């Protein structure tokens, strides 16, 4: 099995990161929209918020590890003949995705830290997480929480928009350009083939 990336495709580790985080992000977005419409005092709502926070921290940790793995591995080449504008858009899109994968859970962490309720965060009912210091420039706790809640929601929709563009670009490459861009994120075969050609 091809674990590491090559110039021709992604290894199994990068592919596992990609799809695990895709599933987590989709679940967090759906749960986030659902739980905001629930009675905040209901026991089930509290439990759902705790699970949302737990998986949000998991996404943050995976994003950091994934970035480290990306720096330790070569990025597969973009297809030959790809227009410069599309190349720039691809690089900006990936940078934006990584930035939002870090900023979104961090904004949520700041939001619960600013809450006047002072509710502790315990990841998966096991690991307590301390609150972050909230900048005084954001005002009192209630004002800071409201501002950070709005920011968290905006970042969530921004991530959703980038994911939609990301999927659309992958489908374009697969069905219109007919290159390996999508296939190399679902299989290590392109990565292995490129390694075999250079060995």
Image (cartoon, rainbow, N blue to C red):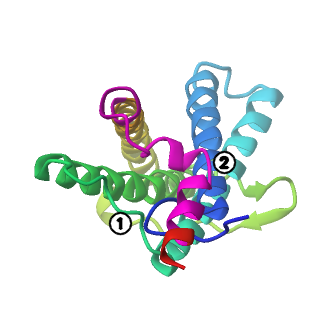
Which residue has dot 1 on it?
Answer: 136
Residue sitting nearer the eye, 197 or 68? 197
Residues in magenta, as a range: 172-195
Whether residue 142 is in magenta: the answer is: no
**Dominant SS in magenta:** helix
The label number, if any, that marks residue 20 in the structure image: 2
Q: Quadrant of the C terminus?
A: bottom right
At x 72%, y 56%, the residue is 120
Q: Nearer the viewer, residue 24 or 128?
A: 24
Residue at figure coordinates x 38%, y 58% from the top left: 99
- Percent position of residue 56, x then y: 62, 50
Q: Can residue 5 be seen here? A: no
Residue 15 picture quarter: bottom right
Label 2: element kind:
helix
Distance between the Cα atoms at labels 1 and 2?
36 Å
- Assess whether residue 175 is covered by the magenta stretch: yes
Q: Along the line of sight, which residue is nearer the eye, 41 or 124?
A: 124
User: Percent from the top left, x then y, of residue 24?
Assistant: 64, 42
Which percent across, then down, holds residue 74?
44, 74
């Amino acid at each position: 099995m091809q674990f590491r990336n090559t110039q021709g495709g992604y290894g199994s580790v990068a592919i596992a990161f990609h799809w695990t985080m895709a599933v987590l992000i989709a679940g967090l977005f759906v749960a986030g929209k659902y739980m905001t419409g629930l009675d905040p005092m209901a026991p089930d709502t509290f439990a759902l918020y705790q699970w949302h926070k737990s998986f949000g921290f998991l996404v943050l940790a995976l994003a950091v590890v994934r970035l480290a793995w990306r720096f330790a591995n070569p990025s597969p080449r973009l297809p030959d003949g790809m227009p410069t504008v599309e190349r720039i858009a691809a690089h900006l899109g990936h940078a934006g995705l990584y930035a939002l994968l870090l900023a979104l859970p961090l904004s949520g962490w700041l939001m619960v830290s600013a809450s006047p309720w002072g509710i502790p965060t315990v990841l998966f009912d096991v690991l307590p997480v301390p609150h972050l210091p909230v900048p005084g420039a954001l005002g009192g706790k209630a004002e800071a929480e409201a501002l950070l809640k709005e920011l968290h929601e905006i970042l969530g929709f921004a991530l959703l928009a980038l994911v939609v563009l990301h999927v659309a670009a992958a489908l374009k490459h697969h069905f219109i350009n007919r290159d390996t861009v999508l296939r190399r994120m679902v299989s290590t075969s392109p990565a292995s083939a490129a390694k075999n050609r250079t060995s």
